[in-house]
Structures are given as structure tokens and as C-alpha cells.
Amino acid sequence: MVMARKQATDKELADKLAAVEREGRDKPVDARELMAMVEGIVASMEGDLSPMSIKLYSELEQLAHFIQKAKSEIAQLRPDEIRDQHLPTATDELEAIVGATETATNGILNAVEQIENLTAEMPPAVAEKVSEAVTQVYESCNFQDITGQRISKVVKALQHIESKVDGLLSAFGDEMTKHRKDGASQGAPADASKQGASGDKALLNGPQLPQDAKGQADIDALFASLG
Amino acid sequence: MSIDMHMPILIVDDYKTMLRIIRNLLKQLGFDNVEEATDGSMALTKLRDKGFSLVISDWNMEPMTGIQLLREVRADAKLKDLPFIMITAESKSENVIAAKEAGVSNYIVKPFNAATLKQKLTTILGNF
């Protein structure tokens, strides 16, 4: 009878290991499943454990607990929020900077080109000085290209981080969903830059992205609607 | 021998603002026949369609970069001797070496000033 039960346990363990091997190709082994299997293996040994085996079991158990704790701590960092909110927001803000500096630079160039065109009507000595100043403005406008390229590099780095966080989230699977629900029930703030902010500080939103920004007409309408 | 200030010059950059700046600086220097392209492949098409006397190109563009354009130009029997200036923010030694090996006529690092542009043009074209 003891032999029959042992054989049944062995088969059950073998089936679990086979399942883990199959699933393990697509996702990491769950720490709790690992612990259950280790316990199953130990139980199936029916008291034949050597001191070395007991030590090994203890080490494996600690390892499983450590993995579980680490996963829980990482999940509390809310990598889903980092991927879904913070990184895209940072990317949008940077792209808005590029757009704004380009618009400003073109505005400066428009004005300076008009000034340059007027040099034909100026006394030669004045025209020469104005032309020199105009040249300096052209040279200074180089900054837009340089800052644009630098920001593009940062955006690429953020996109790389985003893909890594995405991989982390895939590895976490259901555990992330659990923490997301927990976070939602605690009313976790969506904007990390404002976490802990209250009162006037909570109103410091900074410039809005062009697609989100209100125009003066919107502000006037809102202002008027407030009575 | 004086140089032709009406020579056709092709400037290539994916930043419209930069094209505008280079065009304006060339205009101040007296060059009034300037055309633009926003990447290497567009530039190559223009170069093959029309005879240009000088190319001033950025490096970092898509889909065809400045260095790819340079290599295409040097590999083309009709264009291989065309003066080609690279104006780029790529300032690492390896970039300059690669451009030189590809046959660039001169290399200007952004941000640049009008005096540097004039100096490089003089080196290639002669005094003006």
C-alpha cells in the first residue's frame, strides 16, 4: 500500500514537472508552484532524507521565498504604470520640446530674414553691421538642430527602457494584475511627479502638450463660465 | 580665377530649419543658386537629374544617411568628382575618419559659424 501511494505521488510529480517544462518555454516558473513541487519531492521520499537533502531542501525553500519576495517588491514599483504612463508622457514632453523649439526658431528666422531684406534700404555702414548681427542669429539658430538630435537620442533610450519594462511585465503575468488592483483600491496617484504633492504644489502641472493644451479662447470661456 | 557665384549647390538636411540656416548663410556669402533635399535618397535623385557643382550634406538622416549618399556619389562615374562637404553633429574621430575614407571633401561640425563655412568653401572652390 505504501509502495502504491509512493508510485502515485511520483507520477503526479512527474506530470507536474512535465507541465512546468512545457509552460516554462513561454513563461517563468511561479515561485509558489516551485515550493509546492519541492515539498512534494520531499514528501515522496518517505523519511529517506539524508542531512544533506534536508539542507538542500531548506536552501531551495529559502530561494523560493526570496524570489517571491523580490517579485512582490518589484511589482510594488508599479512597472505597469511606468510603461503605460510615465515613459510615454516623458517621450511626449520631449517631442513637444523639439516641436516648440522648431517653431520658435522658424519665428526668429522669419523676423531676421525680414530685417536682412531691409539692409538694401539702409546706409552701407549700418547695413554691414546689421548683416553681421543677422549672421550671428543664423549661427545661433544651429542650437535647434543640435538639441533636436540630443532629445531624439533620449527618446530612443526611453523607448528601449519601455521595451525592457514590457518584458518584465510579461514575465510577471498575473502578479502584476493583482498589484494593479491593490494599487487602484488604494487610490494610487497617476502622476509620479506629483506623488505626495498637495495644495498649491498639486497644481504645478507645467506646460501642457499641444494636443492637451487649452487655447486662450478656451480659457476665456472657462473663466467666463465660472461667473 | 574667380568662382561662379551662380553655381548650383545642393544642401541636404532632414531639419528644415537647418536647411534654411545654411541657405541664408550661403546667400550672405553670395551664392544664389541653392536647392534642398531632406535625405540622401532625395539628394541622389536630384544629383543624377541635374548637374550640381557642390553638395553640402548632413550625416544623420533617414532613410539614406549622409555617408551613404557620399559613397553613392563617389561610386557614380558621373558624380565621383563632385565636391562634397559634410556638416554634422557627429563629431567623433571615427566619423571623421569614415567620411574621409569615403571621400568627403571637407567636414564641418555643428554648431558651426559662417566663418567656418566660408573657410571650407574657399579650401574647396578657391577664393571668392
Image (tube, grey):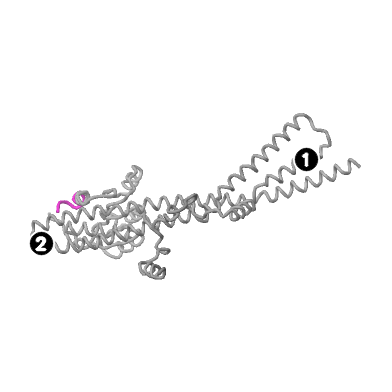
Give the answer, above or below, for where B103 lies relative to B6: above
Near-viewer residue (A149 or A222): A222
Near-viewer residue (B99 or A149): A149
Disc 2 chain ID = A
Name the disc covering residue A41, or none.
1
Instruction: Bin the neighbour count of mark 2 within 10 Å (Cα to Cα): few under 14, some 14-19, many 20 and up.
Output: few
Name the residue at 56% across, 55% down.
A187
**Picture coordinates of residue B47, whole percent (x, y):** 30, 61
Name the disc covering residue A122, or none.
2
Q: Nearer the viewer, mark 1 or mark 2?
A: 2
**Picture coordinates of residue B3, whole percent (x, y):** 15, 56
**How far is mark 1 from mark 2, CA to CA?**
95 Å
Name the residue at 39% across, 58% down.
A207
Residue furthest toward the front?
Answer: A227
**Would residue A58 be found to the left or right of residue A161 on screen?**
right
Name the disc covering residue A156, or none.
none
Is the same chain shared between marks 1 and 2? Answer: yes
Per the image, label 1 sits on a secondary structure element best described as helix
Residues rendered magenta in the picture: B121-128
Looking at numbered disc 2 in the image, what kind of residue is underneath it? Answer: Met
Near-viewer residue (A88 or B13): A88
Looking at numbered disc 1 in the image, what kind of residue is underneath it? Answer: Ile
**Picture coordinates of residue A156, whole percent (x, y):** 44, 52
Q: Quadrant of the N terminus of chain A?
A: top right
In reply to whether residue A39 is colored magenta, the answer given is no
Near-viewer residue (B94 or A25): A25
